[in-house]
Image (tube, rainbow, N blue to C red):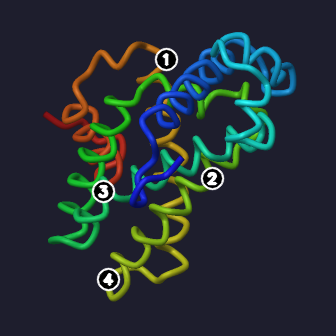
């Protein structure tokens, strides 16, 4: 299956088809109502093939979430510690929203309630929270205040992102990043 650390093309294709089929089902129905049999039928693979890659549908969900989180973290990592806090946040929002835009179907599905688990959302918040609070150390607010501010911003940002995804990502990522940036640092004060 692996050649020199690389997955065989057939293995990559099979995993891709299984994942896409699962995401399609998860977009329409709750996780608890999805069976391995359904996933296999949608992906046009047999159960033995499915089980060669994943223990069950929950392991499949976990693998998809882990891949998205790893990619998202790599995508924004370089922006986290550059410049002043406002610059860091805007650059991070731009990169994060660009990644989300490019992977809208998967992210929208992982953030919806059909997964019956808010773990993905909480991991994203935790991942950026640690970096946000660390960037605020030595600033005008205490670590505790920075944590409260971050939680307020994070849950608001998740709500905005979910709305953006639900309405078809009509605004470009850079425009939405600017809105989130302004809401983060200026609140509800009107801006240009």
Mark 3, secondary structure of its residue: helix
Which residue is at the front of the view, 128 or 102?
Answer: 102
Q: Which is nearer the N-term, disc 3 or disc 2?
A: 3
For the residues carrying marks 1 and 4, which lies nearer the camera in this image? 1
Distance (Cα) linking label 2 and label 1: 19 Å
Which residue is at the front of the view, 59 or 15?
Answer: 15
Q: Which residue is mark 1?
A: 166
Residue 139 is marked as 4
For the residues carrying marks 3 and 2, which lies nearer the camera in this image? 3
Q: Which residue is mark 2?
A: 122
Image: 120 above or below 39: below
Distance (Cα) linking label 4 and label 2: 25 Å
How far across and down, in percent of the image, does residue 30 sit? 78, 21
**Residue at position x 54%, y 22% in the image:** 17
Distance (Cα) linking label 1 and label 4: 36 Å
Residue 9 is marked as none
Tell me if 158 is positioned left or right of 179 in this view: right
Residues at marks 4 and 2 touching, judged by CB atoms closer than 8 Å: no
Mark 4, secondary structure of its residue: loop
Distance (Cα) linking label 3 and label 2: 17 Å
In which quadrant of the rendered image does the C terminus lie?
top left
Residue 76 is marked as 3
Asked if residue 154 shows in the view, the reply is yes
| Quadrant in the rendering for residue 76 | bottom left
Pointer 2 local density, CA inside 10 Å: few below 14, some 14–19, many at least 20: few
């Amino acid at each position: 299956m692996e050649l020199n650390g690389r997955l065989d093309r057939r293995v990559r294709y099979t995993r891709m088809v299984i994942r896409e089929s699962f995401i399609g089902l998860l977009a329409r129905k709750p996780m608890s109502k999805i069976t391995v049999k359904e996933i296999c039928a949608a992906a046009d693979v047999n159960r033995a093939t499915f089980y060669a890659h994943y223990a069950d549908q929950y392991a499949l969900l976990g693998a998809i979430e882990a891949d998205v989180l790893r990619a998202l973290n790599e995508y924004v990592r370089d922006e986290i510690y550059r410049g002043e806090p406002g610059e860091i946040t805007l650059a991070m929002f731009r990169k994060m929203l660009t990644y989300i835009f490019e992977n809208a179907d998967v992210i929208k599905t992982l953030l919806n309630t059909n997964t019956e688990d808010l773990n993905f959302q909480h991991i994203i918040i935790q991942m950026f929270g640690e970096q946000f609070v660390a960037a605020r150390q030595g600033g005008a607010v205490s670590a505790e205040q920075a944590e409260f501010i971050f939680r307020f911003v994070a849950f608001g940002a998740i709500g905005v992102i979910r709305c953006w995804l639900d309405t078809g990502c009509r605004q470009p990522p850079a425009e939405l990043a600017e809105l989130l940036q302004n809401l983060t640092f200026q609140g509800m004060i009107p801006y240009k």
